[in-house]
Image: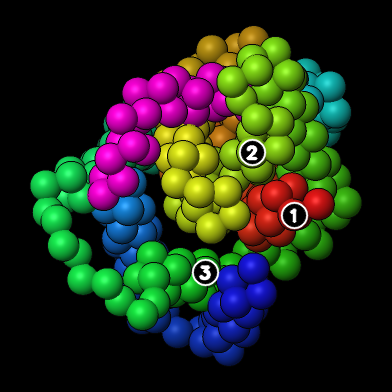
């Protein structure tokens, strides 16, 4: 845990120092995407090489899907209870049901493009899974390459956060009200996954809570659980948090219609700062992009603390 936090803190410091360098940050986002895909590939290799674990993948996928649905429903309900139907004036103006522009952001095209990223991430994992099955005799290294890639990812995520000029501006503009959304997501996610684990004895309570505490951040939560609980729960965490992202994108209009504009950033969890942000813009309105961005940043930073705390208390 400590090396992960050190890597993130170092990244935040570097991001702040180089915050005015557009060249660095124009490279950072696409590089981060590829590092995540590499990490998922390595996780797949590890699971594919474990024949006993590989045989359980269909069951693990079902468990992941059930936990994803419970996390989404819990988050949406908690946000509705805390923020109300219209968000208790958190937004700067009334919700806008639809935003159109030529770039595709905030449009159905943007949604499908964002979902494509989820499918590519899943493909990277399954390619690693296939490689682990077909290729025997991977070299035994004195260090775990997936852990090294995780440290790199945490540095890059920290750098992106530290160099983002919108974070302090958003905090000053909206104040303490911004904290309500991520708090609702945390409470709702954990309540939903806890209830599911209690109702389905096949799900261990502690591990189910830790899966939920990934808040949609599939790469980090899955690797942390691999270290803390083993490959089975790493696979469940990965699949569950990918499912959470896909459910948010597919069900976006229904969620907003049933539970109000706070539903989308709540359902997206940590992904509300990137892949599900376009859906929030389209269906919740432009005024909700700022709370969504802030919530995603907070949940991204919180994930390693929450997963580790749950698994070690």
Q: Which residue is mark 2?
A: 207
Q: Element type at marker 1?
A: helix
Q: Where is residue 82? Give x, y as percent.
A: 85, 28
Identify the image quadrant of the N terminus.
bottom right
Q: Could you tell me which secondary element the residue under label 2 belongs to?
A: helix
Callouts 1 and 3 close, C-beta under 8 Å? no
Relative to 247, is 104 above or below?
below
Dot 1, crowdedness within 10 Å: few (<14), some or many (≥20)?
few
The residue lying toward the viewer, choosing from 274 and 217, is 217
Disc 3 element:
helix
> Which residue is depicted at the point 84% across and 22% down?
81
Whole-number angstrom distance, CA of label 2 to CA of label 3: 22 Å
Q: Are marks 2 and 3 in contact (CB under 8 Å)?
A: no
Please tell me which residue is depicted at 31% across the width and 46% down the height of the picture. Answer: 50
How would you rate the neighbour count of disc 2 (Cα within 10 Å): few for under 14, some for 14-19, many for 20 or more?
A: many
Which dot marks residue 312?
A: 1
The label nearer to you, 1 versus 3, is 1
Q: Residue at x 18, y 45 (%)?
A: 133
Residue 48 spot, x, y in % from top left: 26, 45
| Magenta range | 48-73
Indicate yes or no whether the magenta region holds residue 60: yes
Q: Which residue is mark 3?
A: 154
For residue 297: magenta? no
Mark 3, other Cα within 10 Å: few <14 / some 14–19 / many ≥20: many
The image quadrant of residue 259 is: top right
Position of residue 295 in the picture relative to residue 59 (left or right): right
**Can the viewer see residue 249?**
no
Q: Please, which colouring scheme is shown?
A: rainbow
């Amino acid at each position: 845990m400590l090396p992960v936090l050190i890597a993130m803190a170092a990244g935040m410091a570097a991001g702040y120092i180089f915050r005015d360098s557009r060249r660095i940050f124009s490279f950072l986002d696409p590089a981060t995407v590829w590092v995540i895909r590499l990490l998922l590939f390595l996780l797949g290799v590890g699971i594919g090489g474990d024949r006993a674990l590989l045989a359980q993948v269909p069951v693990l996928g079902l468990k992941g899907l059930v936990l994803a649905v419970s996390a989404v429903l819990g988050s949406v309900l908690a946000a509705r209870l805390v923020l109300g139907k219209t968000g208790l004036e958190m937004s700067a103006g009334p919700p806008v049901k639809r935003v159109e522009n030529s770039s595709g952001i905030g449009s159905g095209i943007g949604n499908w493009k964002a979902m494509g990223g989820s499918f590519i991430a899943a493909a990277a994992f399954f390619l690693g899974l296939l490689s682990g099955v077909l290729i025997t005799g991977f070299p035994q290294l004195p260090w775990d390459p997936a852990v090294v890639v995780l440290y790199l990812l945490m540095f890059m995520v920290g750098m992106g956060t530290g160099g983002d000029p919108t974070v302090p501006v958003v905090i000053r503009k909206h104040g303490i009200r911004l904290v309500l959304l991520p708090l609702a997501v945390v409470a709702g996610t954990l309540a939903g996954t806890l209830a599911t684990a209690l109702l389905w004895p096949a799900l261990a309570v502690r591990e189910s809570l830790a899966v939920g505490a990934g808040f949609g951040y599939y790469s980090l939560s899955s690797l942390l659980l691999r270290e803390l609980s083993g490959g089975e729960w790493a696979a469940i965490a990965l699949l569950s948090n990918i499912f959470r992202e896909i459910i948010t994108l597919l069900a976006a209009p229904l969620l907003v219609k049933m539970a109000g504009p706070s539903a989308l950033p709540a359902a997206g969890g940590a992904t509300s700062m990137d892949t599900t942000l376009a859906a929030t813009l389209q269906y919740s309105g432009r005024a909700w992009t700022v709370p969504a961005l802030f919530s995603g940043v907070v949940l991204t930073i919180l994930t390693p603390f929450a997963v580790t705390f749950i698994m070690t208390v």
